[in-house]
Image (spheres, rainbow, N blue to C red):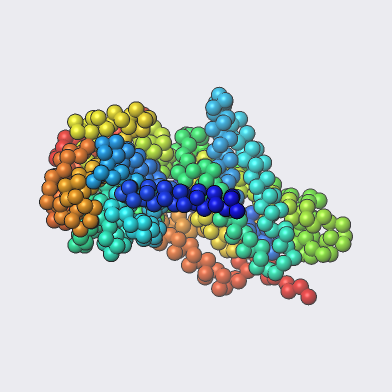
């Protein structure tokens, strides 16, 4: 009998503790491909979110409460993204930083819109994400139509009179980006020699590479992710094809160079001006470096989404997503990636893409000045 | 012509890898009459073992590539064979006299178990290796198109041919091969005549897994990466190859593998890359309509 009493007491205490913890914390979430082929980017996002939440909590939290971070893994799969979105909505999360793949962010945003959740993507660049007049979506990165323009501009300047091929991986992101680049190129009076698609997850690109070789391609533009791009580069070099590969923001992870080895040299991609070099990011970059993390790619963008949201919540005095969205769109926010303002659709106002180049040692650096 | 030769090389190499995996499907089907759906994952395990062995050998300072390759090959075959043996022992042998579908369902379960095991044990990320076998030859040039044949492509095709010859010999000329053929025809009768059926079936799985390990290693060398999910697609393609060639027939599996590899490559070369899988599977359907037992398959005799 006594043991039963003790048990009851312990249970009661445990429940009291857990509800207390629940009442104190505001749950927020980061969602992206934590596993699978794109997990390198999921890790970038999680690193960014982890540190942002820790920093916000260290500074006293939001509305006097601490944030607790939940992690959703969508494996860059649209179906998985929906179920992750449903799970997070069920956990009464008012805000999600995510997802990574456009093909995940878009279906997930519909679930969030219905369940009253605010979504800020740090990484999904497909224009459609903010073009569907959903009330709850914002993004802190650029769009593929802008990215395509910058890529097309670079190609036209440096490859006029040469042969260009465009490939895509049939995903929302890859196909969208390839289409935007093609559109921008064609509008500039430049016609590609080959427009083809492959399956995301393919490993054997030898047939395509031989085809590029027979068409004497000088530059191949890929709308796709880093794994396939890396394999294409490797197989091009094995077949003795010297063509340069150019891709979008999905090449901004060091993992690309581990696939290609020294063959990465000369590969180009477009991305925002390196956030790590911004004066606003200096202190946070130091913190990441102290933990042994290189805050590359979308790490700081994810950190920034948390900052925007927490500042807006503090200003509104509530986590009500509808009010927070209004506030975010109305104001300007200081973040690690600079001052951000949003338009009515939810895109950031000032965006510029620059061209980066990989070297043989597995590093990348900007090669064009901003806005060019 | 130069372009065609290059695509032919591409297709033959891809087909060889499919063929190596397909042999494992076909041998098991021939003897036990079940489709070992976990075979694609055994192939994936082979790739991972090869990767781990390679990294260990490099970290202890071995640099002579032929020795590395040989050691990796042996370790990968041995370890993966152990996996093949265990899978049979755990998941199939207890169900051998159960109803026909039971081992197949068990195989699907085993496939998931192995995939998830690799995901948990090795992480979900892609594991790349730097190019190990580099270099190659420019065969000839026409109209500015240079036909390249890389060393690794030569290794893949030669290894496949040697292994195919070795196992054809093993099945047709050795004691073990005779036991295997006996079990294929009638397990009860073979047992009555002194053939150790359990051992023979175990050996079949061991050999199939060892071949899958070779395929896994070739895959690692050729494409430079492995991931926990690669067994699924490769397994489906190889299974298709086995069916196309006539399931149960060793040369058929190889022929099926080469056909699938060539169809995919040639379709990508002259039509669209997008529809290469559609092309491969359409041809499979057409072949099966006119030759229900596949290219080299024998019609199944209903045992009374």
Where's the C terminus of chain A, which quadrant? top left
Which residue corresponds to the image point at 36% horizontal and 56% vertical from the top-left?
Answer: A91
Q: Position of residue A92 (x, y in %)?
A: 33, 57
**Foreground residue among A323 and B132:** A323
Position of residue A95 in the picture relative to residue B163 (left or right): left
Which residue corresponds to the image point at 66% horizontal and 66% vertical from the top-left?
Answer: B102
The furthest residue to the top: B61
- Rendered position, B115 above or below A241: below
Q: How many marks?
A: 0
**Foreground residue among A366 and A196:** A366
**Foreground residue among B126 and B237:** B126
**Foreground residue among A288 and B261:** A288
- Rendered position, A307 above or below A365: below
Q: Position of residue A304 (x, y in %)?
A: 24, 42
Position of residue A319 in the picture relative to residue B281 (left or right): left
Q: Position of residue B50 (x, y in %)?
A: 57, 39
Can residue B118 be seen here? The reply is yes
The furthest residue to the front: A2
Q: Position of residue B266 (x, y in %)?
A: 44, 56
Position of residue A234 in the picture relative to residue A7 (left or right): left
Can residue B18 be seen here? The reply is no
Which residue corresponds to the image point at 36% horizontal and 36% vertical from the top-left?
Answer: A254
């Amino acid at each position: 009998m006594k043991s039963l009493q003790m048990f009851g007491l312990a249970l009661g205490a445990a429940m009291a503790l857990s509800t207390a913890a629940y009442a104190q914390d505001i749950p927020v979430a980061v969602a992206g491909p934590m596993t699978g082929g794109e997990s390198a980017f999921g890790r970038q996002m999680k690193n960014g979110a982890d540190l942002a939440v820790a920093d916000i909590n260290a500074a006293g939290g939001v509305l006097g409460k601490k944030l607790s971070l939940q992690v959703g893994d969508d494996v860059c799969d649209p179906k998985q993204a929906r179920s992750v979105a449903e799970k997070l909505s069920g956990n009464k999360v008012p805000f999600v930083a995510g997802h990574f793949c456009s093909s995940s962010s878009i279906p997930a945003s519909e679930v969030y819109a219905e369940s009253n959740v605010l979504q800020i993507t740090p990484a999904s660049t497909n224009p459609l994400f903010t073009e569907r007049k959903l009330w709850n979506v914002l993004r802190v990165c650029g769009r593929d139509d802008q990215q395509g323009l910058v890529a097309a501009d670079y190609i036209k300047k440096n490859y006029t009179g040469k042969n260009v091929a465009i490939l895509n991986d049939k995903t929302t992101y890859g196909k969208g980006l390839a289409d935007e680049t093609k559109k921008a190129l064609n509008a500039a009076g430049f016609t590609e020699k080959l427009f083809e698609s492959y399956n995301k997850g393919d490993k054997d690109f030898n047939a395509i590479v031989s085809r590029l070789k027979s068409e004497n391609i000088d530059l191949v533009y890929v709308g796709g992710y880093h794994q396939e791009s890396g394999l294409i580069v490797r197989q091009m070099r094995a077949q003795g094809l010297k063509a340069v590969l150019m891709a979008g923001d999905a090449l901004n992870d060091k993992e690309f160079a581990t696939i290609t080895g020294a063959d990465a040299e000369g590969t180009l991609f477009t991305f925002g001006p390196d956030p790590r070099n911004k004066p606003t990011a200096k202190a946070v970059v130091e913190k990441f470096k102290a933990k042994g993390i290189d805050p590359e790619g979308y790490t700081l963008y994810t950190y920034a989404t948390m900052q925007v949201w927490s500042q807006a919540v503090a200003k509104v005095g509530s986590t009500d997503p509808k009010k927070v969205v209004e506030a975010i769109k109305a104001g300007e926010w200081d973040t690690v990636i600079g001052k951000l303002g949003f338009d009515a659709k939810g895109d950031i106002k000032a965006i510029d893409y620059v061209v980066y180049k990989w070297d043989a040692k597995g590093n990348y650096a900007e090669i064009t000045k901003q806005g060019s | 012509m130069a372009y065609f030769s290059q695509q032919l090389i591409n297709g033959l190499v891809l087909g060889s890898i499919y063929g190596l995996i397909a042999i494992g499907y076909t041998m098991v089907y021939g003897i036990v009459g079940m489709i070992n759906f976990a075979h694609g994952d055994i192939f994936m395990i082979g790739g991972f073992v090869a990767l781990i062995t390679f990294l260990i050998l490099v970290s202890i300072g071995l640099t002579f590539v032929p020795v590395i390759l040989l050691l990796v090959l042996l370790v990968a075959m041995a370890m993966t064979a152990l996996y093949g043996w265990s899978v049979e022992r755990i998941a199939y042998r207890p169900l051998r006299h159960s109803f026909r579908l039971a081992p197949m369902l068990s195989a699907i379960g085993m496939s998931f178990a192995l995939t998830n095991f690799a995901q948990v044990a090795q992480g979900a990320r892609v594991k790349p290796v730097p190019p190990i076998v580099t270099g190659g030859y420019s065969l000839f040039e026409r109209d500015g198109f240079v036909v390249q044949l890389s060393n690794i492509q030569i290794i893949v095709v030669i290894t496949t041919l040697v292994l195919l010859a070795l196992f054809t010999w093993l099945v047709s000329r050795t004691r073990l091969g005779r036991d295997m053929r006996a079990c294929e025809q009638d397990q009860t009768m073979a047992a009555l005549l002194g053939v150790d059926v359990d051992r023979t079936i175990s050996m079949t799985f061991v050999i199939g897994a060892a071949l899958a390990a070779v395929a896994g290693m070739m895959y690692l060398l050729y494409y430079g990466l492995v991931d926990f999910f690669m067994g699924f697609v490769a397994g489906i393609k190889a299974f298709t190859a086995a069916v196309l060639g006539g399931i149960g027939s060793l040369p058929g599996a190889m022929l099926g593998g080469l056909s699938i590899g060539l169809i995919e490559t040639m379709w990508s070369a002259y039509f669209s890359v997008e529809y290469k899988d559609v092309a491969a599977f359409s041809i499979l359907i057409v072949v099966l309509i006119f030759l229900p037992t596949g290219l080299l398959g024998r019609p199944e005799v209903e045992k009374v």
